[in-house]
Amino acid sequence: MLVTCQQMQEIEAAAFARGIHAADLMQQAGCGIAAEVSRFFPKPGSLILYLGSGNNAGDALVAARELQEKGWLIHVRLSGPANKLKPLPARHLQALPAVCQLSEPVEMETLPRPIVQLDGLLGIGATGALREDVRLLAAEMNVQRLKHRASTVAMDIPSGLNGDTGIPEEDAVIADLTVTVAYAKQGLLADTAINHVGRLALVPLPDLKPDWATPDTGSQLLTPEFLRPVLPRRDFDFHKGRAGRVGIIAGSAGYYGAAILACAGALRAGGGLVTLLVKAEAYPILASKAPPEVMVKVVKDYREALDRSFDSLGIGPGIGLTAEAEILDIIRTAPLPCILDADAITLLARGHSAIFESPAPRLLTPHPGEMQRLMPGIQHETRVTQARLAAERFKGHTLLLKGARTIIATHGQMTTYNATGHPGMATGGMGDVLTGVCTALSAQGIPLPQAAGMAAWSSGRAAEMAALTLGQNAVLPSDVAAHLGAAFLELEE
């Protein structure tokens, strides 16, 4: 669930009243933050701590101790005198060996890379404009991030960002990764916060639980802990028929790659039998280029898919706009889940009535431009409002709004946010892989809202894994498909 800053403070106060010690929570939080830093930066380098005087600094110092043991070189930049630190952070600073405390900005050129700046200046209790001493250090972090390509990791919340509204103050920290603790704060997922938060990760703290009887379940950040129970566990005598019969309607002249990528996504997501349905003119090329595990079948009319024993249909990547009647009829009549992407969404935008007659659930996966075609006039609304309005309009179906914070909405159900992935995914074909993953998960019996969330999380995580060796900007959709297995393995473990 998402919480407000006040709710988070109430949860902490209730924990203290039960006898939970702040020192223990600080230890757990710091170790969790260190684990996330190691996950995204597996090669030890230089860690620069930017510390305020509060307990947020203590979390950073615990994380620094853990990372120092793994070979990281530690530097510290304090916003004020060391004797102004609260007792717990002061104790951790004194106990941290071989630390270089700096009164001036560090000489970045001399440091081993990677260089990670850990933002421990302010916690969720701080609001309003940054104090001058804090503002100067926050601005310094932002400059060094741009000038020297240092990576910034914010703890719990980027300093200077409002945890409830997501509105940044002047010189608020711009993070590449924000590791929030216990629960995601609602401001972290606001549209205005995206470029300050970066990748959002969560460190669960089991000792911090809501003290109110009915927790707010209206919104949820997708995490491995949330998704893992949804992933089916296969019996030992499992066979390909039980793994899902996946139908993909994709590909046309000039857009053959979309079909290949969708099929690759379906295979790597565990689809048991993947069939690509194509028109005759596309068959020679797609039959030669499709993965060998894919069955490529020629159809005169896409509606022939209705006569086959599919468990789920993925429709749209690269099909073009010439088969409008066929595609809309499938959307209108198919008695099985369908994932609608790309050209299928464009065709649907011309004939909304088709989806209102559908006998089974549909998953719509628009990017922002396609969303405007589906729902004209809502471009000035926030992304989550857009997704919820679309879910309200298309009741019974699920909306996956792509973007840096993919949002999944279904009328009457929890809205979920995905935060995996990186800017290197801004390249053609990523959505085709996602369509294949969604379709395969749906074919395995996972309801569409959960299948969409798992597909978004796993695709984004696969892209992150690929970037560890390739760099973000070099990651291709085919690399994402190739790393899906590793992403699902991490989800299982």
Image: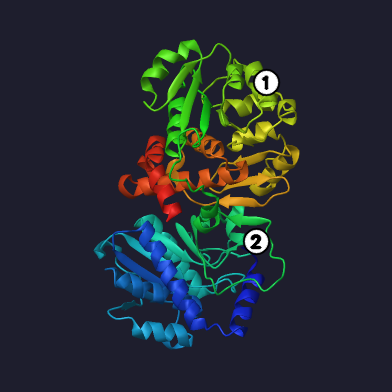
Q: Secondary structure at mark 1?
A: helix
Q: Quadrant of the C terminus?
A: bottom left
Q: Amino acid at mark 2?
A: Thr
Q: Looking at the rendering, which quadrant does residue 62 occupy? A: bottom left
Seen in the picture, residue 282 relative to 176 is either above or below; the reply is above
What residue is drawn where x is 69% and y is 47%? 385
What residue is drawn where x is 39% and y is 75%? 77
Where in the figure is residue 259, as x and y percent of width and height? 47, 25
Residue at numbered disc 2: 165
> In 3D space, how far apart are the residues under numbered discs 2 and 1 (Cα atoms)?
43 Å
Q: Amino acid at mark 1?
A: Asp
User: Which disc is residue 239 wearing?
Assistant: none
Query: Do we see residue 178 in this rendering?
Result: yes
Q: Nearer the viewer, residue 326 or 312?
A: 312
What residue is drawn where x is 44% and y is 22%? 295
**Mark positioned earlier in the residue sequence (2 or 1):** 2
Q: Secondary structure at mark 2?
A: loop
Where in the figure is residue 406, as x and y percent of width and height? 56, 46
Q: Quadrant of the N terminus?
A: bottom right
Query: Do we see residue 104 in this rendering?
Result: no
Badge 1 local density, few (<14 within 10 Å), some, or many (20+)?
Answer: some
Between circles 2 and 1, the one closer to the viewer is: 1
Seen in the picture, residue 302 relative to 363 is either above or below; the reply is above
Say left or right for 473 vs 304.
Answer: left
Where in the figure is residue 211, as x and y percent of width and height? 67, 74
Where in the figure is residue 264, as x and y percent of width and height? 42, 32
What residue is drawn where x is 30% and y is 47%? 469
Q: Nearer the viewer, residue 398 or 241?
A: 241
Badge 2 local density, few (<14 within 10 Å), some, or many (20+)?
Answer: some
Contact, mark 2 vs mark 1 (Cβ under 8 Å): no
**How many numbered marks are there?**
2
User: Which disc is residue 329 wearing?
Assistant: 1
